[in-house]
Amino acid sequence: MNFNHAGVIGAGAWGTALAQVAARAGLQVTLQAREPEVVASIAAERENAMFLPGVKLEDAVTAAPGLDALASCDLILAVPPAQHLRSALMALKPHLKAGAPVVLCSKGVEQGTLKLMSDVAFEVLPDAPIAVLSGPSFAGEVARGLPTAVTLACEDEDLGRRIGEAIAIPTFRPYWAADVIGAEAGAAVKNVLAIACGISEGKGLGRSAHAALITRGFAELTRLAVALGGKAETLAGLCGLGDLVLTCSSPQSRNMSVGLALGGGQTLEQALAGKVSVAEGVASAPAVRALARSLGVETPICEAVAAILAGEVDVDSAILGLLSRPLKAEA
Ligand SMILES: NC(=O)c1ccc[n+]([C@@H]2O[C@H](COP(=O)([O-])OP(=O)(O)OC[C@H]3O[C@@H](n4cnc5c(N)ncnc54)[C@H](O)[C@@H]3O)[C@@H](O)[C@H]2O)c1
Ligand SMILES: O=P(O)(O)OC[C@H](O)CO
């Protein structure tokens, strides 16, 4: 089956950037937007002024308010915030074309159930082929045509390859993989670690601390992913190390910027005030902590972030706690 018409659920920054990529790859694209003003601004100005201002959208991108508009799509890109994926897929279900693959692009763990995005999708859409797209990719950069590469994970590797080829353009290079769980675990945990790196930066702890945090964070991320059934080699790729390095290294990251604000002395409420964009690590941190504990996996950095966000500990005490941990072998 060739893909001709992509439907994108969620016209936030990333949904809009992916719509742009798919259109540049030659697909017709229907972009479902919850906000009437987003539908209107795309129709009138060819721009998503609310979530991705300054990017002129390709003619092949059409915005629509309802998921019924995706009924003829042969490829779905699901891009709502992670905590809303379940409700979005339930709303999609009556309109989903038989056999159309659903590519999960949200990064997080569902609160309450502690499920990865693919577990949620398998529950809601048991008959749909599922894939995961993840990797180092800031929406603004991708939409402006700056280059990157991502992981396209699908248990059916031939389908993963065909989806990857359908949406690839020279500046957006999907590499396929079979390890869906590894790809998703990397995506969810890196957002929590980016908050930690932001805090370190906001407190002025220096470049050495930053590098040490990324490295020990990568060890946590890999341990948890492997305990969930992922492969360590997947986490060494774009959806793990690649995305971790990006998100932990730039204030363009919403997650890192929340950490920067916390490290600079703001409360979580102040750090999130006035933001239209989602910082997924805030919602995922308690879920990642609970998931790791349930599996007996040590994740001290994620634990510290979850405790700070929950107001259980202040930033300075959390840092002291991490620096006072017993010394141990590195590997
Ligand atoms: N922005 C990026 O650079 C980027 C890159 C890769 C992956 N992602 C992931 O993509 C997902 C979406 O992020 P984004 O940056 O596009 O979002 P965004 O912050 O730009 O926009 C928020 C989105 O949430 C939607 N929304 C708000 N409340 C909702 C609800 N109750 N139900 C359903 N949708 C609701 C809005 O309509 C909007 O589409 C996240 O999981 C994020 O981690 C983002
Ligand atoms: O802005 P963030 O922190 O949500 O990160 C965006 C992307 O996930 C980076 O790959």
Image: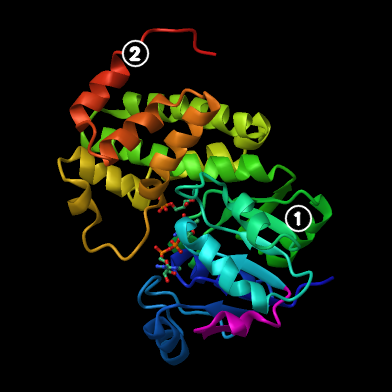
Q: Which of the pair 217/288 is nearer the observer?
A: 288
Q: Residue at x 31, y 20 (%)?
A: 322
Residue 261, image x, y percentages = 22, 46
Residue 327, image x, y percentages = 39, 7
Q: Which residue is drawn at 61% across and 73% down?
A: 92
- Residue type at mark 1? Gly
Of the two numbered discs 1 and 2 on the same chain, state the one appearing first in sequence.
Answer: 1
Residue 208, image x, y percentages = 34, 24
Left or right of residue 294, residue 76 in this image: right
User: Is the residue indicated by label 1 positioned so its CB lies within 8 Å of ligand 1?
Assistant: no
Q: Which residue is drawn at 67% across and 55% down?
A: 122
Disc 2 designates what residue? 325
Q: Which residue is drawn at 70% across and 70% down?
A: 75
Residue furthest to the bottom: 44
Q: Which of the pair 23/292 is nearer the observer?
A: 292
Q: Indicate which label's residue lies in the foreground, 1 or 2.
A: 2
Q: Regarding mark 2 in the picture, which secondary structure is present there?
A: loop
Look at the image and tell me in which quarter the C terminus lies.
Answer: top right
Left or right of residue 56, residue 25 in this image: right
Residue furthest to the left: 265
Tag count? 2
Say the numbered circle drawn on residue 288: none
- Residue type at mark 2? Arg
Range drawn in magenta: 60-74
Q: Which of the pair 305/204 is nearer the observer?
A: 305
Up-down: is 316 above or below 166?
A: above
Disc 1 designates what residue? 160
Instruction: Give the quadrant of residue 12.
Output: bottom left
Disc 1/disc 2 C-alpha distance (Å): 42 Å
Instruction: Confirm whether residue 323 shows in the render.
Output: yes
Q: Regarding mark 1 in the picture, which secondary structure is present there?
A: helix
